[in-house]
Image: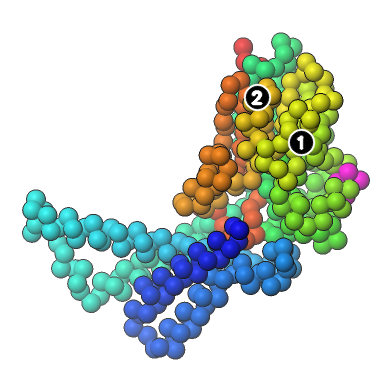
Amino acid sequence: MFHIVLNFGTGLMALVIILKMVLPLRVSVWIKILLSFILAVFSQRVLLNALFSPFFDFTQIPYLRQVLAGSCQTFIFIAFFLIVFSDIAIFLYTKAAALKPFKGKLPTAFLSQKSFPVFKITCIFLFTVTFTAAGIYNGRKVPDIKEVRIESKLLPQDWKPLKIALLSDLHIGSSFGKKWLTQVVEKTNAAKPDIVVIAGDLTDGTVNELADEIMPLKSLRAPLGVWIAFGNHDYFRDAVNWEAFYEENGLPVLNRKSVRLRLDSMFNLGGTTGRTKKPDIDSIFQWGEEKAPKILISHYPQAFDKAAENKVALQLSGHTHGGQVGFPFDLWARATNDGYLRGLYKKGDSWMYLSSGTGLWGGLPVRLFTTPEITLITLERKK
């Protein structure tokens, strides 16, 4: 459904850009036809990608073509919203200029000059190119370490601070590969966490296609190991084989189950699957140590309501990418995730940290107004 809405929406945006920016240009009709054709094609990028794979598998599309197509689609988004905002601003300005307190005081003659439409189009174009370039850079860079400190009442008296490295939404194959992931692993190891958790959406492709690309995860180092819970994208392609692959390579997957771990104090670490947004928390921790605190890895943040009911000390989530490109996608992300977007949330004595994502989805390989992150969480007992 998301892909259909995205495809239809970008098609309408491209139409507005053609009417507002391309047709008014003082160039030959053939150049206008060419520019309109390019906009129309790139606005239907998701549909074209679907022709390569019924599961929107971007691993089948050459990397440079992904970035180029994604950049053009981002250009369409930004240009459309700048057109809308500029038209609203001009409308409000002209209405204000006609009001008695401002009549004759606000200049309006420039709006009717022949050069004004060209000036407006030029400004929109330059702003769009700048924002698109910034979004590509911000989306492609290796994330910095983001440190977060959480104090919980649900931890025992003898609890010592636990350092948790959280990775989420790597999307290896659709946006990133081995080189980028190697750098992420090096940064994560340099933070010296006690445990590493990966909150889903690791890959966009099959084991045969991406086994070598995902291998840097084997180099993650932490005393309590590396633990994975699947996200929705992990079920799009080859989920059964991926789970077996991770287990064989020392990267256990916690799908609807939990384990008991101890560093200085014992705790239960559980994981949900990417198939359900509101899992049965009781069944996940049914074999855990009853008196030990619970930490939950859930790709979907919607699990937090039930996690809080079950006195989970900390839930670690991803999925939303923090909105990834800002307005209006942050509104979409909030609306479809029970109001959760990114950062820390508290319910009762339970905490959730919702990552903005370490990587991003290949369908839109840019970030605006959000930053990727490798999250280093220090979980302490509240005094």
x, y percent for residue 28: 39, 88
Upstream in sequence: badge 2 or badge 1: 1
Whether residue 23 sits left or right of residue 305 in the image: it is left
Mark 1: secondary structure: strand
Disc number placed over residue 309 in the picture, else none: 2
Residue designated by label 1: 271
Quadrant where the N terminus sits is bottom right
Tell me the magenta residue range: 245-249
Residue type at mark 1?
Gly
Residue in view at x 75 percent, y 42 percent? 273
Residue in view at x 37 percent, y 85 percent? 27
Residue 168 visible, this orientation: yes
**Disc 1 residue crowd, few under 14, some 14–19, many 20+, Cα 10 Å:** many
- The answer for how far apart the CA atoms under marks 2 and 1 are is 16 Å
Q: Is residue 53 above or below residue 212?
A: below
Residue type at mark 2?
Glu
Whether residue 198 sits left or right of residue 152 in the image: it is right
Q: Is residue 37 above or below residue 124?
A: below
Residue in view at x 51 percent, y 52 percent? 329
Can residue 247 be found in the magenta stretch? Answer: yes
Residue in view at x 57 percent, y 27 percent? 346
x, y percent for residue 348: 58, 21
Give residue 91's quadrant in the image: bottom left
Disc number placed over residue 17 in the picture, else none: none
Magenta: main secondary structure equals helix
Q: How is the image coloured?
A: rainbow
